[in-house]
Structures are given as structure tokens and as C-alpha cells.
């Protein structure tokens, strides 16, 4: 079938298998170009099919020659209907890993469930014995609790009072003012249940119980702080409460890993175009201005550049892991540089529908968004028929 992007709000309903493969190949080639990482050898990535999770799996495999198991929850293709992009990403990754002689297997299912945790542990025990790195990179908006059976849904809302600021419709470029109503206490609790650290801790508890973690094992989750411009809707909003919980959980997990001399970290990463970030009001405008500023300064990074630098310059230097006063790894250091933030704040005050194409990088935002779904790559022929029924080699 000929596959074209079909948009509904901040979601693309289709994905292109050859475009997704191209995106994965680009990331693999980048990692190969940066040289060997003396890093992990047996890696579990929970949330391995898109964004930072996929970049972590690629960096582990093609940067450190690690065996990897990836867990994700993706929609397979049907005749005449494409799979989700994460499905095609994972298929491309598995193919490249196999051709490179790397161990790689994947599990498709609800990572919040006890069933998928046990299935993953069984695979680790049978094939790898133990893992030395566990990446936790889930970005689901919904979680059904495996104990209570309650389904929790996260919300992106400010706390205490309404929040009004600029935003942009990145499809049209229209800059407008948006007001977001404040959350309820139930909203906070639900968001923490979905996006906080409880499930991360449950995974580590299960791995410890199964004796599936190596001595000196590291586990890593991803977070975001961002600037004062976005804090009312992000870091001081419902999602910020969830991130606070996630970061506090790292200390609890570290205590549990003491007998293994292991450690849990939260890495605070840069703002990037993801399916999740596109849904947050205000963030697309901020990212557009940030991209313009960081590209002009020659310090722009995508997911793969961020994770390569995280592994090479933070996690596996041989000289300990540098953290901030709250124990977090700060790989958002370039984004949060004073000269970068001062420039973004200046541009923010000026931004209008008319001048955004000039003072921001809305085109870069749109391009990155399309790339998430396998569209917009110059060397992919989108007019030709392609097979949407791609299978994933190594899927358990």
C-alpha cells in the first residue's frame, strides 16, 4: 500500500515502515561513528520502541556491543492498516542487531502488568542469566495497576490556579493564548500512579527477587525539569509531581540494590519532540524557540545524541557518575545554559504567528514530528507501494 501521514491533533494515525527503518539506521550509524563505549553488556530496556528508550537500546547494542531485551506495547499491522511506529522501529532494530551478530529479543505487551514482568524475567534467566543495566523509559498516559486493578489516567494540568500563556499549533504555525484549568487532587494521584516511580520500583523488586541483576547493576529512569517558562504546566504541575515521585524512588531503589553494590539514577534530559511532548500545551512553542537557539549555537541534540553523551560522558566514564545536589544526572546541561535560556525567554516575548517562522524553528519541529512516524526522510520514496505487514524478528 501507499502510506501517507494522516493527522489527528498531535497524533499521526499512520506509520511508514521504510521511513521508520531509515530513522533507526540513522541512529545506529551515528552511534557507530562515535566509537566504542566501555559500557553495559546485558541490558533490559523497558519502553524500548521509541524516543529515549529506543536510543538507549541502540546505544547499548551498537555502542557497547551489549545483548538487549526490549519491552514495549505496540500495535502490530493488519492488512491495509499500518502498525504503530514503535513496531516498525523495533523490527528494524532487531534486523540490524541480528545482521551484526548481536543478541536481541523483544516482548510486546503491557509493561505495567505482572504477566509481562514475569515473561521478561523468564527470558532473562533462560538466555542471559542476569542483566547489568535496566533502562526504565515508559511514556504511557494510562496504567492499570497490577494489584488493585484500577485504571489510572494521567493529566497535564497546573496545580492551584489556571495557567495562561502562549502556545502554537505546530501543524498550522498559529500562535495563540491558551488557558489550562487547574487539576484536582485526584488528577495528581492518578498522574503520579501512571508516571511516578511505583512501577519502576516494582520492576526492580521483581528482578531482585529473581536474582536477575548483576553485581554493580545500574538502573536508570528519565525525567525532565525545563525552564521557568514551562514550569507551571510541567514541573510545578501534575506531571511535575509524578517526576518528583520518580526521582524520590531512585533513592529507594538504590537502598534495595546495596547488597549488589548497584545504583539507581534519574537522568534529566533535554526537551525534544516526542509523541508525549507534542500533547503538552506551551511545550511545542518552547521547543521551536529552543531548537532555533541551540542550532545556532551548535549544541542541538536529538534523542540519540543525548543518550550517547549520557552513556559516554556520565554513566560509563570509569570515574564515577556526576550528579547534581539532588542526585540527578543532568544531561540537560546544554539546554539549561544561561545564554540559551536568556535567548529563548527573549524570543518567547516576541513570538507571534507572523514572526515564528523567522525567530523559531517550527520547520525543525514539524520535521522531527513527522520523522517519529517514518515520514519526511528525503531518501525514502513515499509514492511507492510498501509492505505494511512487517514482522519483528526475535519477538517472544
Image (tube, rainbow, N blue to C red):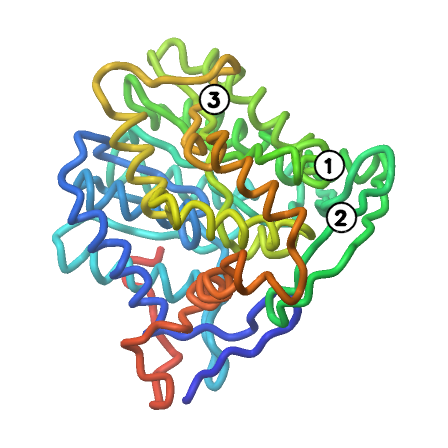
Which label sits in the foreground, 3 or 2? Answer: 2
Sooner in the amino-acid sequence: mark 2 or mark 1 = 2
How would you rate the neighbour count of disc 3 (Cα within 10 Å): few for under 14, some for 14-19, many for 20 or more? some
Mark drawn on residue 232:
1
Above or below residue 39? Residue 353 is below
Question: Cα distance, mark 1 to mark 3?
Answer: 21 Å
Q: CA distance from mark 2 to mark 1?
A: 10 Å
Q: Secondary structure beneath disc 1?
A: loop
The percent coordinates of residue 303 (x first, y second) are: 39, 47
Q: Is residue 151 visible?
A: no
- Real-space Cα separation, disc 3 to disc 2, in angstroms: 29 Å
Percent from the top left, x then y, of residue 207? 42, 28
Whether residues under marks 2 and 1 lie with C-beta atoms below 8 angstroms apart, the answer is yes
Residue bearing mark 3: 328
Quadrant that contains the N terminus:
bottom left
Which of the 4 image quadrants contains residue 175? bottom right
Pointer 2 residue: 165
Crowd tier of the residue under label 1, counting other residues whose Cα lies within 10 Å: few below 14, some 14–19, many 20 or above: many
Question: Is residue 68 placed above or below 12 in the rendered structure?
Answer: above
| Relative to 338, 177 lies left or right | right
Question: Residue 201 location, x and y as percent?
Answer: 53, 27
Foreground pick, 203 / 231: 231
Q: Is residue 127 shown to the viewer in this render?
A: yes
Asked if residue 282 lies left or right of residue 205, the reply is right
Which element is circle 3 on? loop
Circle 2 residues within 10 Å: few <14, some 14–19, many ≥20: some
Q: Secondary structure at mark 2?
A: strand
Q: Residue at x 32, y 75 (%)?
A: 378
Label annotation for residue 283:
none
Mark 1 or mark 3: which comes first in sequence? 1
Amino acid at each position: 500500500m501507499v502510506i501517507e501521514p494522516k493527522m489527528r491533533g498531535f497524533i499521526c494515525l499512520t506509520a511508514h515502515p521504510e521511513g521508520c527503518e531509515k530513522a533507526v539506521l540513522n541512529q545506529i550509524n551515528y552511534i557507530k561513528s562515535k566509537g566504542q563505549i566501555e559500557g553495559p553488556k546485558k541490558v533490559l530496556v523497558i519502553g524500548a520502541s521509541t524516543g529515549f528508550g529506543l536510543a538507549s537500546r541502540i546505544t547499548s547494542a551498537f555502542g557497547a556491543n551489549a545483548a538487549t531485551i526490549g519491552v514495549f506495547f505496540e500495535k502490530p499491522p493488519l492488512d491495509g492498516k499500518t502498525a504503530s511506529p514503535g513496531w516498525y522501529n523495533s523490527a528494524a532494530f532487531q534486523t540490524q542487531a541480528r545482521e551484526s551478530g548481536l543478541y536481541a529479543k523483544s516482548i510486546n505487551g503491557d509493561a505495567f502488568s505482572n504477566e509481562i514482568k514475569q515473561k521478561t524475567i523468564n527470558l532473562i534467566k533462560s538466555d542471559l542469566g542476569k542483566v547489568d543495566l535496566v533502562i526504565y523509559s515508559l511514556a504511557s498516559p494510562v496504567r492499570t495497576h497490577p494489584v488493585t486493578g484500577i485504571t489510572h489516567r494521567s493529566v497535564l494540568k497546573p496545580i492551584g490556579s489556571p495557567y495562561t500563556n502562549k502556545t502554537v499549533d505546530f501543524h498550522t504555525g498559529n500562535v495563540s493564548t491558551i488557558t489550562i484549568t487547574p487539576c484536582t487532587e485526584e488528577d495528581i494521584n492518578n498522574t503520579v500512579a501512571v508516571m511516578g516511580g511505583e512501577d519502576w520500583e516494582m520492576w526492580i523488586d521483581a528482578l531482585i527477587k529473581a536474582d536477575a541483576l548483576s553485581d554493580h547493576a545500574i538502573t536508570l529512569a528519565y525525567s525532565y525539569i525545563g525552564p521557568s517558562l514551562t514550569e507551571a504546566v510541567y514541573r510545578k504541575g501534575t506531571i511535575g509531581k509524578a517526576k518528583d515521585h520518580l526521582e524520590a524512588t531512585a533513592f529507594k531503589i538504590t537502598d534495595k540494590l546495596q547488597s549488589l553494590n548497584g545504583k539507581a539514577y534519574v537522568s534529566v534530559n533535554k526537551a525534544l519532540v516526542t509523541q508525549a511532548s507534542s500533547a503538552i500545551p506551551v511545550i511545542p512553542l518552547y521547543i521551536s524557540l529552543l531548537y532555533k537557539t541551540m542550532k545556532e549555537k551548535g549544541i542541538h541534540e536529538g534523542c540519540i545524541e543525548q543518550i550517547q553523551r549520557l552513556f559516554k560522558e556520565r554513566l560509563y566514564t570509569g570515574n564515577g557518575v556526576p550528579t547534581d545536589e539532588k542526585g540527578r544526572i543532568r544531561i540537560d546541561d546544554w539546554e539549561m545554559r544561561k545564554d540559551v535560556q536568556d535567548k529563548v525567554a527573549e524570543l518567547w516575548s516576541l513570538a507571534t504567528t507572523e514572526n515564528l517562522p523567522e525567530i523559531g524553528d517550527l520547520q525543525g519541529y514539524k520535521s522531527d514530528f513527522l520523522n517519529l512516524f517514518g515520514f519526511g526522510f528525503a531518501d525514502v520514496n513515499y509514492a511507492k507501494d510498501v509492505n505494511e505487514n512487517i514482522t519483528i524478528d526475535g519477538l517472544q
